[in-house]
Amino acid sequence: MADALAGRPAGVPRPRLTFSPSGWLLAAVMAFFVVNVVALVVSVLFNSFASSWFATPIPSGWTTRWYRFAATTFQLSDVLVVTAQVGAAVVAISLVVGAPAAYVLARRTFPFKRALLLLFLLPMLVPPITYGIPLATALYKFNLAGSLRGVILANLVPALPFVILVLTPFIEQIDENVERAARMCGASTWRVFSRVLAPLCIPGLLAAGLMVLVRVLAMFELTFLTAGPGDQTLVVALYYSVFAAGIRPAQAIDAMAVVYMLTTFVPLLIALRFVNPTQMVVRLKREAAA
């Protein structure tokens, strides 16, 4: 009966899971990594609510005053507003510019297409600090750095290729006959794009926007090099709260870290419902090798 419910013919033995020594070693390494990450996150979370925590497994008391301390001392509300402004602007501009570019790369064949695609992917293949310093120097030369505009422009450099990389496979999966049928019915290019392609690409657009938002929230180097005193995103403000001059309670710093983790993890978890990271990595490697 159990075999029938499991969808296995009667009399067929159950497959046994076997692990080689290398498999056990890999499992042990992965378990060690996961346990350490979870322990680190839990310790930061506990410490952000701890009134005091010394030689005990859990804090001796709980409080929320460190979050209030971080909000007033580190100007957390202003930092969150700047972070939201930068994230919204980068996501909007990246989608508006990246969607047509992804359509051209998915539908058209032209000379030097692979070279152009590789040029788009360079900001994702090299560390941001390698081009961040020359980029910041150029932005300061034109009086753009040290302002909100400079932070947005700097974050667009890796965000726009990322949008193109995510949207191109979505557009490639849409049958071109759908577009041809719309044009035969008299639809203009804009109507085909806005009424036919855009609704079909909504999962890709949503995934691209959310993952760009995560990249902006996590982009420390470019934001650090181009932000002014009042234009710091949350990750840069967290860095200054740790390394700036003065003594600050560790619990308040952990409170800021918890806020940062929440603002990063939530969009990432939502984005993973719409995009497969494995497909993105395989495509990135294939295009880079070509």
Image (cartoon, rainbow, N blue to C red):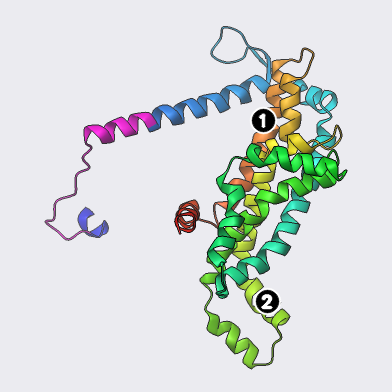
Name the residue tied to disc 2: 193
In the picture, the disc for residue 258 is 1
| Residue at 45%, 27% in the rendered image | 35
**Residue closer to the observer: 160 or 200:** 160
| Element class at badge 2 | helix
Expressed as whole percent of the image width and height from the top left, the position of residue 3 reads 21, 55
Expressed as whole percent of the image width and height from the top left, the position of residue 131 reads 66, 42
Type of amino acid at the residue the image marks with label 1: Val
Residue 166 showing in the rendered view:
no
Would you call the spot at circle 1 few (<14 residues within 10 Å), some (14-19), or many (20 or more)? some
**Residue closer to the observer: 85 or 97:** 97
Type of amino acid at the residue the image marks with label 2: Phe
Residue 115 showing in the rendered view:
yes
Quadrant containing the N terminus in the rendered view: bottom left
Above or below, 29 relative to 102: above
| Element class at badge 1 | helix
Q: Find the residue positioned furthest to the left.
A: 11
| Residue at 78%, 25% in the rendered image | 70
Q: CA distance from mark 1 to mark 2?
A: 41 Å
| Residue at 69%, 44% in the rendered image | 216
Would you call the spot at circle 2 few (<14 residues within 10 Å), some (14-19), or many (20 or more)? some
Range of residues picked out in magenta: 8-29
